[in-house]
């Protein structure tokens, strides 16, 4: 048995560099079968280590391009590694493809590729190491694949650059919080650079990781010598740093690129030494892939991603229009939210599949940690699984069945759980009774192996109009539950239901609650008074040191209170009229000026005489080379905002001209051109169904059948994807859709368009609108 | 940083060449460049070859490499944070997203040019698969040689690189290659050329 965390464990060193030395290049995995004696010899030369890693770094069905079967190679690789007579740890490297949303590989595809190799080897290895990963999301897929198919120890190491982040922007703290939550046995850093350069990252891991820390550095930084990259760090210096790491508390050491059997032999002297105990500060931390939020002081949880009582969001979710959800998320982030609650519970929807889509969409645009909010445990499980980071779960309560359904999910994924102080009998009246439930929740969580810093308690707000006397019980309960060592949350705005001037009550209650230890109000961050109260509390309670963040926000304050964002960024350009506003492209004033216009004119007049006229003028200037593309786009965005206001005044759909489906075709991810066309079309009153980028032909055809658009617009930037465009055109026509097919993009012209069967080629967004307008008149 | 040259390049990418520059766009560009300086994680990986790798033994590479004593094969990127920000602005401010996209392209070119000055004397300009009638499929060979996944750059089946602000190419050591529009795929209908400019620099035709 490995005594991880008790005594120092030594892993082996570089495989690739050893092979290169022997003159082997090409696919290293194939050598397990073609040259087993070479691989065995290298493994044997590392037998001073406690653990030997198999020669399988690139062996998964996405990356491996060689001619052998994956299973055959995996088995042979384990057999080869056995020769050293040490523990055999199966080596898993990344797929080499970029996972969504940055790339196009799906989380499930990555998971399946990793699961396949674990399935083949689970009974014949002593553990798994996922190493050299640079994307936390792909790492999560890999860890889940290992843990759901095997119960062997899991080591996980990622690469970091000199700024202390992985290539996709995760810090050591984020990596540790996420991987420890997923239940790995050791975590840390490998490859990246030499031991000296990794000191900072290692130190940060040692401070925050609750599981043993592992380091496998390269043999220093490579130098270019006679046109070849060489590693030149000497053994003594490598050993010096490894010694230092171990003295600071590192538990697992080894080598990566450039290290040789001599290096490992030298550091094997540490094997079996007692691991130095560390003081790890435990905090309640949730994180996305790039942002960690420590729930201390007061952090704002935005409540607006919830369809309850929000007609527009409800409609948008039912019609699978996630743009609206994303816009709400972005607005809350800009207004100063720290965490976003996400709830998609509607009776019409299959919540467990919608939550996955919603999580993906929101995390694509917003880097705030999410709070997955549902009353269905299955939906929670799905949302938490596909979340890239450590989320909050909203919620459990004092009922045993609820806790028994949710705690296993929280434990498996390392999520923080919010517990409500109520049970089957409802919300108890007194603070003491609520405290008793909180205690029950915390203790039950502990029995599932969920520590207190992973639990938060909501002492529940009742409305002051109905239960005036109980308001102070909620606040008192906040004070009591802190003695349990947990952080607290409250849905503050419930307090004012049924009373006039709700904002005043909400703000006052928020202040009371913060004074009594509220850590996370769940509230509307767009309410500048409320957000402002949180910022002010930061100054007065001393958490905002030197009032830095407060001053940063309010330094230009002139006396108008609105969302924080507008305090921060007041546009200096002023438009006199809606026409002027569109022409100048001032989005922030379009809605207000449009409302003013609507006071004296009917909606269709505003559309025809103001919006369209202004856009026409802008279009003329653009065509004449007097305006630049960003200015055209600004005008279109302003017009789009105004258009949305006008639509509110019209019967549903009355102002919409026609439905247009847009997509960047399969094989291409360049969507900036398509996005320009989208904004311009919307500004002219077209309803756009945007399928996104890298869209398979059949998906476009299906969307055409479903939405029956007037036209479909396809975009491609690269010469290599014209073929994808041709296939998409055929798929649309084969599906029997009669809509006009428009194509555009840098590599197209009318000739190519004709050749691939498209109906129209337009050179830019403006020409596209003009052509569509003409067609509509026919 | 030579910001006037960089700005010119950004204007070219935005399609402004025959038009007068606007103060607003100037201000937006300068904001975007400030943002890029914080956001971008410039990474560069390369290998030097004195004997040419096989995929370079055909036109137009041989012409580009004529008279050279070796070649550097390189991949460079601004990192994925830039992509994410461009996408974010696509939701909040489409015009800004457009300017940031163009600014990022120019910034990557600029940083790469600067970095290459440290790689040695007598280096030619970067020649990338897709130039002068070469095939973008050749990116595959560059990826095999360099494994630029290490700096976070991946290649799709259809030969696009991610993060999108990445480049891959070769640099002749010695040799006398000169940039030219002659073999460009959009030679016939290039708006830049019609306006008397080039995509690769400010030199007049």
Image: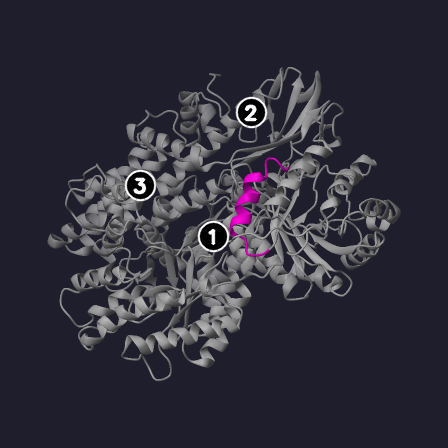
- Whether the magenta-drawn stretch holds residue A557 is answered as no
Who comes first in sequence, dot 3 or dot 1? 3
Element assignment for label 2? helix
Which residue appears at 25% of the width and 58% of the height?
A: A647
Quarter of the image where the N terminus of chain A is located: bottom right
Judging by the rendered image, the residue that carries numbered circle 3 is A634
Q: Nearer the viewer, residue A33 or A16?
A: A16
Foreground label between 2 and 3: 2
Q: Nearer the viewer, residue A315 or A340?
A: A340
Judging by the rendered image, the residue that carries numbered circle 1 is A692
* Residue stretch in magenta: A195-211
In this picture, residue A214 sits left or right of residue B51: left
How far is mark 3 from mark 1, CA to CA? 21 Å
Q: Nearer the viewer, residue A409 or A181?
A: A181
Q: Residues within 10 Å of mark 2 (few under 14, many from 20)?
A: some
In this picture, residue B14 sits left or right of residue A192: left
Q: Residues within 10 Å of mark 1 (few under 14, many from 20)?
A: some
How far is mark 2 from mark 3, CA to CA? 35 Å
- Tell me the subunit letter for badge 3: A
Q: Residue furthest right?
A: A37
Judging by the rendered image, the residue that carries numbered circle 2 is B115
Residue A102 percent location from the top left of the image? 52, 48
- Tell me the subunit letter for badge 2: B
Vertical relation: A404 (above or below) A314: below
Q: Residues within 10 Å of mark 3 (few under 14, many from 20)?
A: many
Residue A112 percent location from the top left of the image? 65, 61
Please report contact status of discs 2 and 1: CB closer than 8 Å, yes or no.
Answer: no
How far is mark 2 from mark 1, CA to CA? 35 Å
Vertical relation: A312 (above or below) A129: below
């Amino acid at each position: 048995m490995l005594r991880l965390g008790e005594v120092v464990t030594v892993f082996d060193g570089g495989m690739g560099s050893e092979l290169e030395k022997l003159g082997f290049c090409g696919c290293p995995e194939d050598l397990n079968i073609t040259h087993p004696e070479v691989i065995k010899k290298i493994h044997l030369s590392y037998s001073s280590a406690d653990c030997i890693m198999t020669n399988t770094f690139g062996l998964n069905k996405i990356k491996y391009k060689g001619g052998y079967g994956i299973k055959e190679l995996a088995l042979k690789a384990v057999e080869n590694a056995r020769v050293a007579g040490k523990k055999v740890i199966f080596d898993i490297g990344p797929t080499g493809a970029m996972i969504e949303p940055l790339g196009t590989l799906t989380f499930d595809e990555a998971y399946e590729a990793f699961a396949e190799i674990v399935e083949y080897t689970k009974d014949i290895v002593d553990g798994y190491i996922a190493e050299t990963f640079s994307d936390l999301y792909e790492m999560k897929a890999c860890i889940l694949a290992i843990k759901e198919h095997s119960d062997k120890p899991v080591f996980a190491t990622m690469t970091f650059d000199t700024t202390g982040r992985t290539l996709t922007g995760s810090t050591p703290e984020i990596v540790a919080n996420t991987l420890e939550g997923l239940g790995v046995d050791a975590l840390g850093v490998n490859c990246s650079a030499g031991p000296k350069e990794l000191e900072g990252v290692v130190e940060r891991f040692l401070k925050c990781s609750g599981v043993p820390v592992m380091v496998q550095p390269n043999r220093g930084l490579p130098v270019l010598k006679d046109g070849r990259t060489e590693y030149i760090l000497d053994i003594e210096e490598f050993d010096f740093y490894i010694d230092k790491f171990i003295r600071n508390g590192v538990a697992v050491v080894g080598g990566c690129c450039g290290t040789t059997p001599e290096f490992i032999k030298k550091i094997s002297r540490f094997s079996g030494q007692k691991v130095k105990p560390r003081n790890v500060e435990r905090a309640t931390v949730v994180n996305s892939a790039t942002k960690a939020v420590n729930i201390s002081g007061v952090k704002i949880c935005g409540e607006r991603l919830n369809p309850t009582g929000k007609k527009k969001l409800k409609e948008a979710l039912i019609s699978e229009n996630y743009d609206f959800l994303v816009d709400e998320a972005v607005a809350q982030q800009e207004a100063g939210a720290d965490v976003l609650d996400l709830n998609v519970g509607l009776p019409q929807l299959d919540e467990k599949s919608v939550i996955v889509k919603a999580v993906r969409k929101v995390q694509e645009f917003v880097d705030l940690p999410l709070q997955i909010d549902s009353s269905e445990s299955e939906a929670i499980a799905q949302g938490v699984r596909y979340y890239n980071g450590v989320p909050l779960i909203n919620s459990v309560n004092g009922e045993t069945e609820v806790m028994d359904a949710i705690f296993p999910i929280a434990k498996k994924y390392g999520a923080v759980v919010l517990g409500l102080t109520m049970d089957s009998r409802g919300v108890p009246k007194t603070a003491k009774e609520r405290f008793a439930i909180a205690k029950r929740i915390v203790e039950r969580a502990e029995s599932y192996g969920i520590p207190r810093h992973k639990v938060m308690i909501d002492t529940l707000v009742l409305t002051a109009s109905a239960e005036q006397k109980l308001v102070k019980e909620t606040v008192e309960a906040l004070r009591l539950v802190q003695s349990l060592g947990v952080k607290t949350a409250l849905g503050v705005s419930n307090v004012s239901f049924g009373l006039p001037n709700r904002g005043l009550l909400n703000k006052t209650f928020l202040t009371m609650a913060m004074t009594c230890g509220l850590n996370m109000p769940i509230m509307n961050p767009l309410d500048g008074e409320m957000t402002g109260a949180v910022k002010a509390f930061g100054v007065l309670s001393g958490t905002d040191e030197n009032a830095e963040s407060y001053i940063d926000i309010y330094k230009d304050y002139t006396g108008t209170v609105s969302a924080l964002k507008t305090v921060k960024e007041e546009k200096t350009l002023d438009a006199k009229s809606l026409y002027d506003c569109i022409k100048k492209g001032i989005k922030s004033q379009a809605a207000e000026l449009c409302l003013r216009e609507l006071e004296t004119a009917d909606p269709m007049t505003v559309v025809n005489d103001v919006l369209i006229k202004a856009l026409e003028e802008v279009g003329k200037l653009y065509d004449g080379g007097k305006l630049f593309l960003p200015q055209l786009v600004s005008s279109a965005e302003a017009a789009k905002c105004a258009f949305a206001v006008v639509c509110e005044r019209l019967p549903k759909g009355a102002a919409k001209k026609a439905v247009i489906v847009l997509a960047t075709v399969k094989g291409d991810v360049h969507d900036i051109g398509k996005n320009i066309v989208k904004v311009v079309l919307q500004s002219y009153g077209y309803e756009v169904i945007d399928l996104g980028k890298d869209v398979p032909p059949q998906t476009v055809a299906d969307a055409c059948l479903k939405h029956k658009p007037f036209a479909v617009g396809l975009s491609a930037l690269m010469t290599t994807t014209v073929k994808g465009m041709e296939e998409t055109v055929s798929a649309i026509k084969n599906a029997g859709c009669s809509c006009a097919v428009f194509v555009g993009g840098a590599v197209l012209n009318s000739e190519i368009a004709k050749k691939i069967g498209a109906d129209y080629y337009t050179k830019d967004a403006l020409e596209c609108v003009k052509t569509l307008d003409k067609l509509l008149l026919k | 940083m030579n910001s006037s040259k960089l700005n010119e390049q950004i204007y070219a990418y935005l399609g402004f060449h025959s038009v007068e520059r606007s103060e607003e766009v100037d201000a937006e560009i300068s904001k975007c460049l400030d943002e890029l300086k914080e956001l971008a994680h410039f990474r560069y990986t390369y290998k030097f070859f004195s004997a040419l790798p096989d995929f370079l033994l055909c036109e137009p590479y041989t012409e580009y490499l004529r008279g050279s004593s070796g070649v550097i094969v390189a991949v460079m990127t601004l990192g994925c944070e830039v992509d994410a920000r461009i996408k974010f602005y696509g939701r909040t401010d489409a015009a800004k997203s457009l300017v940031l996209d163009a600014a990022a392209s120019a910034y990557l070119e600029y940083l790469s040019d600067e970095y290459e000055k440290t790689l040695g004397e007598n280096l030619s300009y970067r020649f990338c698969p897709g130039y002068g009638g070469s095939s973008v499929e050749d990116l595959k060979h560059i990826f095999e040689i360099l494994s630029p996944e290490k700096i976070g750059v991946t290649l799709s089946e259809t030969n696009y690189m991610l993060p999108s602000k990445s480049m891959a190419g070769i640099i002749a050591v010695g040799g006398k290659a000169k940039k030219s529009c002659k073999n460009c795929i959009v030679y016939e209908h290039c708006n830049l050329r019609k306006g008397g400019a080039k995509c690769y620099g400010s030199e007049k035709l």
